[in-house]
Amino acid sequence: MKHRVKQSGAFTVEAVFGITVLVMMMFFIGDLSQMLSAKTQASRVSYSLATSTKERLRFFDSRHTLSQADFDLINDIAADLLVRQAPEKQDGYGLTIESLTGSSSAPTAQKFSKDLDSGEKCNPGTDISALAHLRPTREDGVVFPIYQVTVCLKMEGFSQYFPGMRYANSSSVLPGR
């Protein structure tokens, strides 16, 4: 009987530990789904912006080089796209647009960026200079430019406290016309 008295409350302690682990797992799964959703959203927006950036003939008077005015216009489009998809993300995003133009022997790289609200840079995973081998060449020797658009979205929830999980980013690289 003395042995049974020492175990009173053991079930309660085990239940508290079990429920705590279960709640932590639920928070982790919720953060993971939020991270995947943000990554998908960033991919969708970056591809849309890269598509509009590469259409130099149609939208930008056949200029292959980017200007600050082009970046400002694309940044406004990004804000509008994010408002329609998730209004809370409109202010918490970063944007980087890079272009690689010029001949294959003397390429010219340009970079325009908007930092996240926290001051962190929105950097692509691969610099555009390392992607020079992706530039298509026409039969007559004309080398087309490539454009890389990177969108970074600020994360909310518990994942923001872990290094490398403060924001979700996605890059899209497309050749120009």
Image (cartoon, helix red, strand yellow):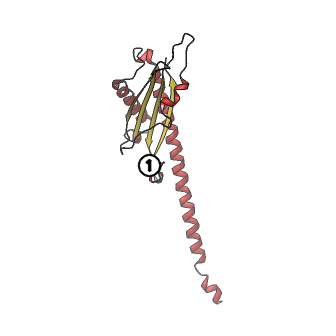
Helix, strand or loop under label 1? loop
Q: Up-down: is 142 above or below 158?
A: above
Q: Position of residue 103 (x, y in %)?
A: 47, 18
Q: Up-down: is 163 above or below 129?
A: below
- Looking at the rendering, in which quadrant would you find the N terminus? bottom right
Q: Which residue is mark 1?
A: 156
Taking the image as shown, residue 94 lies to the left or right of residue 175, namely: left
Question: Residue farthest to the top?
Answer: 140
Q: Residue at x 48, y 30 (%)?
A: 128
Question: Residue farthest to the bottom?
Answer: 2
The picture quadrant where one finds residue 136 is top right
How many marks can you see? 1
Taking the image as shown, residue 137 lies to the left or right of residue 117, namely: right
Q: Residue at x 53, y 51 (%)?
A: 30
Taking the image as shown, residue 23 lies to the left or right of residue 59, namely: right
Q: Position of residue 51 (x, y in %)?
A: 48, 24
Q: Position of residue 58 (x, y in %)?
A: 44, 15
Q: Residue at x 54, y 49 (%)?
A: 32
Instruction: Identify the amino acid type marked 1.
Output: Glu
Q: Position of residue 15 (x, y in %)?
A: 58, 70
Characterize the local packing of mark 1: few (<14), some (14-19) or many (20 or more) Cα atoms within 10 angstroms: some
**Which of 154 and 111 lies nearest the eye of the viewer?**
111
Q: Up-down: is 2 above or below 84?
A: below
